[in-house]
Amino acid sequence: MTISRNPFILFGTALIFVVSTSFAMADTPQQLRREWPRTDFSRATIDLAEIMSGGPPKDGIPSIDDPQFTPVGKIRGLAPEEPVLSVILGKDARAYPLRVMIWHEIVNDVVAGIPVTVTYCPLCNTGIVFDRRLDGRTLDFGTTGKLRHSDLVMYDRQTESWWQQYGGEAIVGELAGRSLKILPSRLESFKSFRERAPEGRVLVPNNPRLRAYGSNPYVGYDQAPRPFLFTGDLPDKVPAMIRVVAVGKQAWTLPLVREKGVIKAGDLHISWRPGQVSALDTADITRGTDVGNVVVQRRGKDVPYTVTFAFAFFAFEPDGALHTETGLVRR
């Protein structure tokens, strides 16, 4: 398996899983304060020892702050089954292809007049869209280069507080304890987005030559025996890297949702259909395994959810319940 957290390096396709000793060590408080002099480390909602270097430095994985879009009908070179993270607010429909997001992880945008931050963490497969307004001001986000439970740790440029991508809570700094509002979004195929939003727009690279867009720097991650740079306890009743559909503290394994086609849980309606490939499988994203399209709604309207890995769900929802083909699993 090939994994590189450095966006400037794409290793070959050999099945090698390399974790350097320096990567696997948590930064000391002194190192953190030297690197982040504006961040108030005296205010934290988590144990700082849980934060690890992912490899790149601050902004080493560059956010997209001036996103460029092309009308969906004029897009060329994007395969129908390729995954996109989509958000529709009012009449404004936008898709953010994972072939771009996998190299940038954060897009600061404005959709239907609402400032949003569109995020994707490849190591957890979490695509989440946030309203980036807080207390009357608009925050702009970048990547810290740090990980917690293998998940992206973001920072806002206004206060340099650190934010956990999974859940959208500030975990370190002036804003520690505050949370961003999560907006409904879908991880779906480009074809699916094009069909439901024919007037929509699609994110395109500002500089198509800046990265190897369309290639996957996490080759074989779907088949990894354990997540990259994860030091916590792994679930013992389900594979750590099995995909799950997470809605708050409840989750359903993707094989279960695929088998049922439709799952109803109270007023929650979860459906699956084929036609979307994984961005974390083969070197060429278009050749990835079909993991299908998931839609989660309540009374006919989309609700926030994420298709993540089981280890991430239990890491951030330790009291959560996972529905499997053989019954309910708790941590």
Image (cartoon, grey):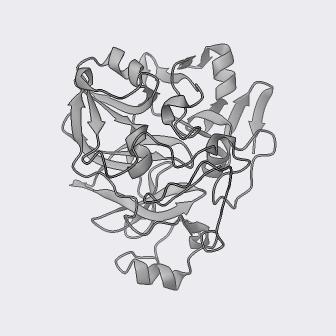
Whether residue 135 is visible, yes or no, is yes
Position of residue 228 relative to residue 220, above or below, is below
Residue at x-position 25% and y-position 44%: 109
In this picture, residue 122 sits left or right of residue 197: right
Q: How many marks?
A: 0
Residue 139 in which image quadrant: bottom left
Residue furthest to the left: 113
Residue 113 in which image quadrant: top left
Residue 251 is situated, as x and y percent measured from the top left of the image, at 63, 33
Residue at x-position 56% and y-position 48%: 218
In this picture, residue 52 sits left or right of residue 330: left
Residue 267 is situated, as x and y percent measured from the top left of the image, at 53, 19
Residue 257 is situated, as x and y percent measured from the top left of the image, at 64, 21
Residue at x-position 27% and y-position 17%: 198
Whether residue 305 is visible, yes or no, is no
In this picture, residue 109 sits left or right of residue 268: left
Residue 35 in which image quadrant: bottom left
Residue 188 is situated, as x and y percent measured from the top left of the image, at 45, 26
Residue at x-position 60% and y-position 50%: 316
The C terminus sits in image quarter: top right
Position of residue 261 relative to residue 36, above or below, is above
